[in-house]
Image (tube, rainbow, N blue to C red):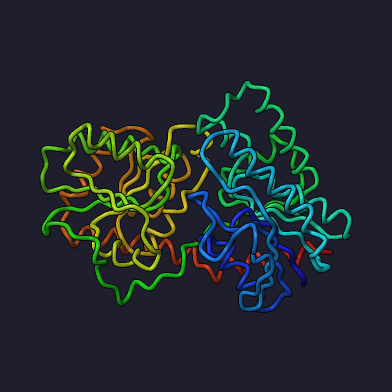
Amino acid sequence: MKLNIFTYVYHPEPFLINELSQELSKVNETTVLTGLPNYPKGEFYPGYSLQSGPYQEQLNQVKIIRYPILPRKKGFLRLALNYLSHILGASLAQKKLPPADWALVFATSPITTAIPAILWARFNKAKVCIWLQDLWPDSVAAVGAMNRKSFIYKILGLVVKWIYKRTDLMLIQSPGFTDNLKEFGYTGPAFVVPNWAPDLDFEKVTTPEWLNLKPGTFKVTFAGNIGIAQSIETILSACEILKNNSSIEFLIVGDGSELGATKQKAMNLGLKNIHFFGRKPLSDMPGLFKASDALLVTLKKDPIFSLTIPSKIQAYMAAGKPIIGSFDGVGGQILEQAGCGFHAEAEDAQGLAAAVQKMSELSTEQRAGLGQKAQQYFQAHYRKDHIIKQIIGYLEDHRL
């Protein structure tokens, strides 16, 4: 089987498509078409530039074809230009792609990454498979970029319908995505393919040097993107509610569009129980998680986010730590099924504070039991080897 992968993000940007492409390439001829890496800061990674690329690379058995883009920047217009540059760049560069059975789209936001894939497949007698990670246009509206009654929202809805109509196979990261497929006219085969956690070694870990905190406190850690969708303000409000409890500390590790504003607000509120560490290497996460007593997931209150499975859940479960959440829908259902933690509704700071307080009052043995349940659920549902085997099976079964 031959595969051409179309993706908005790729190595050295840290996304699952890196691991998927490497695994696929072990038994399939695999080529990746992507832009120059610049996520999330909107700056090209060291060694990459518009002038010198490199526009062709080889990573183990995966051939990588890159195209020039306008870097991702904050602001509606600049982000739109970034998206358009991906469509144009991929459309022009796809003539370098080899023949293949599938155009496989790793569909993070923006889903417009699928447009060049559909065009390539049409002219090269291939099929289109989308691994859907985000729901357009609702996810765009959910972060406040537009109103659901706006003209732009309606146009994006038509674009999504055009894409879905020309897709042969749909893989969705959450069962909650099925209604979106129906709403925008997809009628083909669809299968739930959840995300897995990055490959991390949790056996032999040490606490990162930068994690210098007083011993004996209950440490709750949020790790990952800090954006509008994550509703970090809910964490700040919970911190404020618990500010007189000196035994509880919140650790925020990551970067994103809301980091600066969040740090400033915490300072304005005079919060001493929350600590910001910025973005840290993935290799430091096992040590961070081990040093934490519980791991935290929060999402904005919006119907679209209630349909998704936050990727943090898989990573946290793999670490074998109890989980505290503030979100609606599918995420909460998974925590309840796994029996591995507590959660409140999205944007319910009082409920989140209560969940943190309740977790802190458990014994070390009780929290270890919750962590064990998390790891067991991960092994049963989110193992990378099982999921990739499923993906290959779906592609094999539907390519003819």
Name the residue at 34% across, 71% down. 202
Tell me residue 187's x, y (percent): 76, 44
Image quadrant in which the N terminus is located:
bottom right
What x and y, as percent, mark residue 309?
A: 49, 48
Q: Is residue 334 left or right of residue 100?
A: left
Residue 321 position by quadrant: bottom left
Q: Is residue 284 left or right of residue 90?
A: left
Q: Residue at x 40, y 39 (%)?
A: 258
Q: Is the residue 128 above or below the residue 21 in the image?
A: above
Residues 5 and 328: in front is 5
Residue 132 appearing in the image: yes
Q: Which quadrant would the C terminus be assigned to in this image?
A: bottom right
> Is 94 in front, or is 43?
43
- The percent coordinates of residue 153 (x first, y second) are 65, 28
The front one of 121 and 67 is 67
Give above or below for 147 relative to 59.
above
Rendered location of residue 84, percent (x, y):
69, 42
